[in-house]
Image (tube, rainbow, N blue to C red):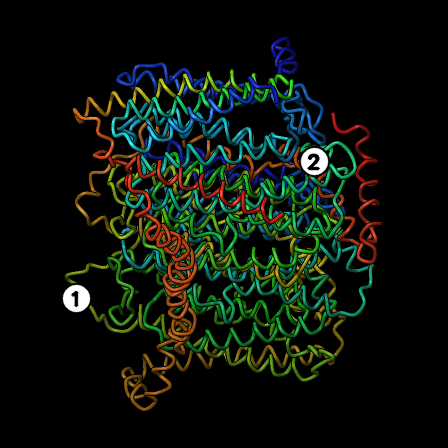
Amino acid sequence: MEPIVAYSLVLSAVLFTMGVLAVLARRNPIIMFMGIELMLNAANLAFIAFSRHLDKLDGQVIALIFMAVAAAEVAIGLAIIVSIYRYRRDVDVDAVNVLRG
Amino acid sequence: MDAIIQMMANAPLLSIIIFLPLVGAILITLMNPAKSHRIKWFAFWVSIATFLISLFLLAGSGGFEKFSHIEQYTWLPQIGVSYHIGVDGISLWLVLLSTFLLPISILSSFSAIRKREKEYYILLLLMGFALTGTFVALDLVLFFLFWESVLIPMYLLIGIWGSGRRIYAATKFVLYTVVGSFFMLLAIIGLYVYSGSFGPGTFDFIYLRSHIAPPELQTWLFLAFFLAFAIKVPLFPFHTWLADAHTEAPTAGSVLLAAVLLKMGGYGFIRFCLTLFPDASVWAAPWIMGLAVISIIYGALVCAAQTDLKRLIALSSVAHMGFVMLGIFSFANTSIGQVGATIQMVSHGITTGALFLLVGVIYERRHTREIAQFGGLASVMPQYYNVFLITMLASVGLPALNGFVGEFLILLGAFRADWALGGLATFGVVLAAVYLLTMFRRVFHGECTKPENQKLLDLNVRELVYLVPLVLLMLWIGLYPKPYLSVIKPAVDRSVRAVMRIASGSVEYARSGEKAATALAQVLSEDTPGGDG
Amino acid sequence: MDYIYLAIALPLLGVLVNGFFGRRMPRKAVGTIASLVILGSFVVSLVAFLGYLAAEGGTHTVTLLPWLSLPPLEISYGFLVDGLSLVMALTVSFVSFLIHVYSMGYMADDDGYPRYFTYLNLFVAMMLTLVLADNLVLMFVGWEGVGLCSYLLIGFWYKKAAPPVAGIKAFIVNRIGDFAFLIGMFLIFWLYGTFSFTELRQSVETVALAGHFPLTLIALFLFGGAIGKSAQFPLYVWLPDAMEGPTPVSALIHAATMVTAGVYMVSRMSFLYSMTEVAMLVVACVGAFTAIFAASIALVQNDIKRVLAYSTISQLGYMFLAAGVGAYWIAIFHLFTHAFFKALLFLASGSVIHGMRGEMDMRKMGGLAKYMPHTYWHFLIGAMSISGIPLLAGFFSKDQILFAAFTARPDIWPNAGMVLWIVGVVTALFTAFYMFRQIYLVFLTKPRFDVAEIHPHEAPASMIAPNWVLAIGSVVAGFIGLPALFAGIIHIPNMFQPFVASAVAGGVHVAEAAHGAQELFKEVLTTSISVVVALLGLGLAFYLYQVRYGTTEKLKKAFAAPYRVLLNKYYVDEFYDNTFVQPGRVLCEQLSRVVDLGVIDGVVNSIAFVIGAVGQVLRPIQTGFIRNYAWYISAGAILLVILLWLGLAAK
C-alpha cells in the first residue's frame, strides 16, 4: 500500500470519528449537520484513496455522486432547520420530538 | 373526413388516449384553484377529447382478432421491459367504456364536489390515464405499473371526498388490493425468471403466451394472479372491501370503481390467466365456477338485507361480477361463456355506472342514502323514475336490455360446462329481481309522506345529458349487440383456444406435463408467426 | 305477408309517441293513438291471415335482422307465420283493441293516463312478439316483456300500498317459472343446437335421441315456465293479487292474453311434448288439478274480480288439460273463446265497479240489473258462455276438452282419461255455480247498499260498445270450431281445427279421427252430461240465491271448517309466506349481519387489528429525538463491526 493511501485512510477514519462524536454529543442541529458532512466527506476520502489503491475510477465516480447528494441533502436539511427555528424560536434537538411514534 | 380518419389511423392512437388525460391533469396543476369553473370545464373537455379520439380506434382497422394499434418501444432493455401496448376485441370495449365514462363522471361531479375542486379533477383525469393504460398494456411490468397506479387516485378520491367512514373505506380498499397485487408481482417476476431459463428474460406478454410454463409452475403462478384478480373482481369471499369503498366514495368514484375498476379483475383473468396458464385455468375452473355461483347467490341474498341504497347497488356488483367469472371459467368446446363474460363486463359497467349516478342524483338532493328515508318519489320526480326504472330493469337482466345479452350467453356457456352450477347460477336471475324490485318499490312507490321529499326537483339538463347516453347504450346493446359481439368473438376465441383444447381433451396433457406444454406452445406459435401485428 | 313485423312495430311506435309526448298531448289524442296502433296491428294480422288463406300452405318465416349471432348460436329477429301464430295474433290484437277503447272511458279521469296507454301498448307489442317469434329466445323476450308490463300495470296505482307489492309478486313468481324455462332452453340448445322452432321441429322429429328422458326433462322444464306465466298450481298465487291493477288490465293481461302464453308455448312446442308421454300426463294432471282447485276457491270468494281471477286460473287449467291429452287445437280453441268471454266478464265487472264507485265486495251489491241493463246482459252472456250453456262459445270449446279427456288413453296410465274427465266435469259444475252465484249476488238479489248514496249508474257508451262486440263474440265464436257432432247437424264445417292443426303436432288422441258410430255415441254421452252439469250448477245457484235466499248463511255455519279453508284459499299464500318469504328474509339479514359483517369482515379487521397491536408495542422505540436515533445507529454500527470481527476470528 502506498503511504499516501494509508495516510488518507487514517485521516478518513479520524474525520469520521469526529463526525460521529459531533452528532452524538452536540445538541445544536447546525453542529450535528456539520458532523454529518464530516462523515460523508470522510467516506469520500476513503473512496478516493481506494480508487487510487485499486487503480479504478469507480471510487471517484461515487465520490462525485456523493458530493451532489450531499449538496441536495444540505439544502433540505438546512431548510428544515430554518423552518423549525421559525416555528419554535429554538433549535435544541432534544426539545423537538414531533416525530414521536 | 376520410383524410382525418386516415391520419388518425396512422397516429399512435393508444398513446394519445392514455396520455391525454395525464397531460390534462398536469395542465390543471398550473391553473388557479379559485377559478373552479374553468377547471371543471377544462377537465370535461379534455375527457371528451379523449373519448372522441378513442372512437377512432374503431375506424381504419381491420378487425380486432389480433392486437392492433400496437406500439412498442424499448424501455428498460437490461431486464426486458418495454413500453408495449395494443388493443384487441377483448380490451377494445373496455377502453372505450373507460374513456366514455370519464366525461360522464366528471360531468356528474360539477355540483356534487365543493371542496378542493382542482385536486379532485386532477385525480379523476389521472384515473382515466391509469384505467386505459391497464387495459392496453402488453408488457407485464407496464401492466403492473398501471394496475397499481389506479389505486392512488382512487384512494385519495375516497379518502378526501368520501362520506361517513371514508378513511376506513379508503384504507381497506388499498390494503385489500395491495395484498393481491403483491402476489401478482411475485408471479410476474416468476414468469420473468422462467422466461430467462431458456432465452433472454422478458416481461412481454406476446412472447410469454407462446412460451407456456410447465403445468406445475403454472399452478403457482396462476394462484398468485388469481388472488390479485379475484380481489379486484371481487369474488366471494374477497368482496368486503367493495361494499365500504363504493358506499363511501363520491359518486364519480363509485361509478369508476364499479364500472371500470372491477373490470380490471375480469379482464386480467381473461387476458392473462387463461392465456398464460391454460392448464392451471382448466384445473381451477370447477373451483372458481363454484365460487362464482356462491358470489351470485350470496351477493343477491346479502343485497336483499341492505338498508343503504348505495350499499345495495355496490353489493349487487358482487352478484353481477359473479356471472362474469362464471362465464370466463365455463370451459367447454365453445367460447360462448367467455364472450358473454366480456360483453357482460361492458354491460355491467354501463348499468351499474348509471345506477350509481342515479343514487348520486338523489344523494345530492337529500344527503341521505337510507332507503327508508324515501318513498313515493315516482310522483315527485317522474323523469328520474323512468330513467331509474329502465336502468333497474337492465340490471335485473330483462331481455331486450343489455343485461340479458351477457347473462344469457354466460349461462348458456356455463350450463354446457357444468349443468348443476349453471342451473344454480340461473336461479340468481330470480334473486336479482327480488332485491332490485323491492328496493325500487320502497324508494319510488307508495305515498310520498316525508315533507322534505315532496319538493325534490326532477332531473335537470346536465343530469339528463349524462344519463340519456347510458340509457341509449343499454337499449343498443340489448337490441342489437351484433357490432359488439362480432368484435369480441374472434379475439376471445383466439384467447381461449388453448384452454378449450385442453378442456375438450384434444391436447393430451394430464399424463405427461412437459409434452403438453410443448404441444401447447406449438399450437400457439402456429397462429403467431413472429408475434402479432 | 312479409310485413308481419309491423304488427309489433306499430304498438312500439305508440309506446314511443305516448311515452315521450303523452304528457303534452290532449288525453283524447293519447287514447286514440294508442287504440289506433293496436287496430293497425289487427289489420296487419288480418291481412297476413287472408294472405295465408290465399296461399296454400302459407307457413313461412320472416327474418329481419340478426340479434345474437355467435356461431353456432344464431338468433335473429325472425317471425313465424303459421296457423297457430295467426290465430294468436288475431285474438290478441282484436281483444286488445276493444280493451283499449274501453280503457279510454274507464281511465278517463286518471292522472296517469298517458303512462297507462304507454304500458298498454308496450304490452301488446310484447305479446305479439311472443306469439310471432320464430325462435325460443325471441319468444322469451316477449315472455319476459309481458311479465314486465304486467308488473308495471298491476302496480299502476303506485301510490296505494297494495298494488306495487302485488306487481312485485307477479314479476317474481313469473321469474321463478322463467328460471325453469331458461333451463329448458339451455337443454334444448345443447341437445339440438338451435332455438328456431322450424329447425327444432325437424330435429326432434328426425333425430332420435337415446331414450326419451332428455326430451321429458326439456318438456317439464319448459312447462315450469308455463306454470309461472299461465298461473298454474303451484305458481298461480300471483294472479289473484294481480287484480290490484285497473280492471281493463285484468281483462287484457290476466284473462285474455298474457296468461295464455303458457298454453300457446306448449302448443307451439307440441312436436316435443307429443314425444314424451310422461310430460304430457304431467301437463294434463297439473291442468286438471288447477282447474278444480281454483274453481273450488272461486265458490266462496266475495270480491267480484277475485272470483273471476280464480275462474281464469281454472279455465287455464282446462286448456292445459286439453294440451296434455294431445288436443292442442282444442286448447287453442278454448283459449280463443275464453279470450272473448273472460274479457267480457272482466270488462263488465269493471263497469259494475265503475258504476258502484269502486265497490268490489259482492256482499254490498245486488239488484244492479235495474240500474245497468247493458252490463247485466254482458255479464249474463259471459257467464252463460263460460258455464257451458249450449250453443254459446264456451260450450263448444269446453265440451270438446272434456270429450278429448274422456277418450284419452295414455299408455302409462290407461285410466287417466277417465279421471281427468271426472275432474273436468266437477269443475264444470263448480264453474256454472260460482258464475251464477255471482249473477245473483250482483245483479238480481235485493240491493244491499244505500241506493240513495251510491247512485249506481250505467257505464258510458265508450265502455258499453266494446262489450257488445265481445258479447257477440262470446256467443258466436264457437261456431268456427264445431265438434263433429254439431258440425254434422248444422252443416258448418270445423274451420278452426285444420287451420291450427297444421301448426301443432298431430297429437296422440285428438278427436279428429273419423267418427264412427261408437265415437259419436260417446260424444253424445259426454255432451249431455256437460249440459246437465251446467244446468245443475245454474239451478243450484238459482235455488240458493233466489228461491231460498239466505240458506247460504246456514250452510256456512254447518260447514264452518271447509268454508274457512276455501275462503282463505287453502292458506297457500300463508304457507308460502311462512316457508319461503319469511325464512328467506331472516336468512338474508343473518347472512348480511353474521357472515358478511361478522365473519368475513371480522377476519379482515382482526388481521388489521393484530398488525396495529404489534405496532403499538414497538411504538416507544420511536422517541422522536434525533440524538436517540444517532445513538441507535452508532450502536448498530459497532455491533456490526463486532459481529464481523467475531466471524472473521471464527474462520
Q: Is residue B285 above or below residue C278?
A: above
Whole-percent x and y of residue C29? 37, 34
Secondary structure, mark 2, is helix
Instruction: Please state, as top left, top right, bottom left or bottom right, where the N terminus of chain B lies in the image.
Output: top right
Q: Is residue B469 left or right of residue C496?
A: left
Nearer to me, B36 or B196: B196
Whole-percent x and y of residue B283? 70, 56
Q: Amino acid at mark 1?
A: Asp
Separation of residues labelled 2 and 1 (CA atoms): 75 Å
Q: Is residue B269 above or below residue C377?
A: above
Residue C450 disc label: 1
Q: Amino acid at mark 2?
A: Ala
Q: Using the rendered image, report if marks 2 and 1 lie on a common chain.
A: no
| Residue C441 visible in this rendered orientation of the protein | yes
Residue C358 disc label: none
| Residue C77 visible in this rendered orientation of the protein | no
Q: Chain of mark 2?
A: B
Q: Quadrant of residue B110?
A: top left
